[in-house]
Amino acid sequence: MRTYIMNSRDNLIFNLKNSIKQYPKLFYFLNHTLGTFVGKSAKQSIAHLPEGSKIINVGSGANIIRKDVINVDYAKYPGVKVVADAHNLPFEDNSIDAVICESLLEHVKDPKTVISGIYRVLKPGGMVYISAPFIIPFHSSPHDYYRWTDSGLRELLKDFQEAELGILIGPTNALTYILREWLALVMSFNINTLRQFWVLFFMVLFAPINLLDHIFSRFNAAKDISHFFYYIGTKK
């Protein structure tokens, strides 16, 4: 198991997020209230799979998508059934019907190894659902390393047969995320704790503006400045 050390740059926000994750319903509510999701969700993507299918959610946190989904995370959050490193999944080859991996790849040191592991455990024809960020400031969980364009995500997942690749969270969310960080920086007087306070303040203040993504995410050029992408594919 790898050792993770919390990053002090956003320790207040990280600790608050971890505390809220102890209450999965509250975490889900806040996540979907403060941000506007416009693309296909993981829950929608696995809706066609019958109950009893072997589905794992890698880097699940406290998110309970469906009762039969096996949550896998490096920390023992409520609902996590398997504590494991995403770089070394403890499942047999060709044994899993579907893998969900949301908002994880930017936080691991070696995304290619994680993707290779997902490919390994999936059955031939098994489905993968991935979400990954494009335009987003630093956010540790507990670290933060990578970003992807839609074409970059497609390259990372080139071993899969692509079914869908689209905008999950749109350009307005990207704009308000960067704006709240900039305003917090300006108003912080170079005091990190104060900066994080203002980030949280503007996160709540700007939440209604994010609803505009229900309109602007439909524009052809929205993918060039979007916040998050989602990918659905199958193992060849």
Image: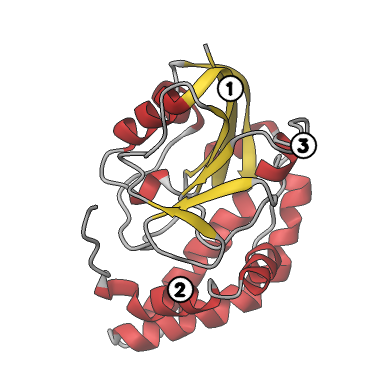
What is the crowding at mark 1: few (fewer than 14 residues within 10 Å), some, or many (at least 20)?
Answer: many
Disc 2 to disc 3, C-alpha distance = 28 Å
What is the crowding at mark 2: few (fewer than 14 residues within 10 Å), some, or many (at least 20)?
Answer: some
Disc 1 to disc 2, C-alpha distance = 31 Å
| Residue 185: x %, y % from top left | 37, 76
**What label sits on residue 18 in the rendered view?**
2
Kindly check if marks 2 and 3 are in contact, taking CB atoms under 8 A apart as contact: no
**What label sits on residue 47 in the rendered view?**
3
Kindly report which numbered mark, 1 or 2, lies closer to the viewer in this rendering: 1
Instruction: Give the residue displayed 48% in from the left and 73% down from the top.
Output: 17
Q: Which residue type carries mark 2?
A: Asn
Q: Which residue type carries mark 3?
A: Ala
| Residue 153: x %, y % from top left | 45, 30
| Residue 219: x %, y % from top left | 71, 36
Instruction: Give the residue displayed 46% in from the left and 80% down from the top.
Output: 16
Q: To which residue does mark 1 refer?
A: 126
Instruction: Give the residue displayed 54% in from the left and 67% down from the top.
Output: 78
